[in-house]
Image: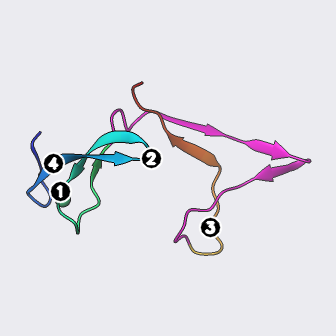
Amino acid sequence: MNFFPECASDLTKAKMEGVERTVCSSPSCTYVFWNNPTTVVAAIVEYRGKIVLARKKGWPGFMFGIIAGFLEKG
Ligand SMILES: [Zn+2]
């Protein structure tokens, strides 16, 4: 794939957190090609008898989730 079908901009390489990734070249687009995006891991983290929950920046104050993320090749 040489371009992102939703905005029709070229794909390019960019370093994200020290890892080179394929991303959309349009400055207004946030598309990132995550390799193997359907494999996920989640964990329930217990600390001092309580469960640790996480919040994503921008979530409403009442929303929390368990610690989770995608796995990718390598
Ligand atoms: Zn784009």
Question: Upstream in the sequence, badge 1 or badge 4?
Answer: 4
- State which image quarter holds ligand 1: bottom left
Near mark 4 (Cα within 10 A), the count class, few <14, some 14-19 or many ≥20, is some
In the drawing, what numbered circle is on residue 17? 2
Dividing the picture into quadrants, the one containing residue 74 is top left
- Please name the predominant secondary structure of the magenta segment in the image: loop
Q: Is residue 31 found left or right of 63 in the rendered image?
A: left
Question: Upstream in the sequence, badge 3 or badge 2?
Answer: 2
Label 3 or label 1, whichever lies nearer to me, is: 1
Label 1 close to label 4 by CB (< 8 Å): yes
Q: Is residue 49 found left or right of 73 in the rendered image?
A: right
In the drawing, what numbered circle is on residue 69? none
> According to the image, label 3 marks what residue?
63
Q: Is residue 15 above or below residue 57?
A: above
Highlighted range, magenta? 34-59
Asked if the stretch drawn in magenta spans residue 31, the answer is no
> According to the image, label 1 marks what residue?
25
Label 3 close to label 2 by CB (< 8 Å): no
Label 4 close to label 2 by CB (< 8 Å): no
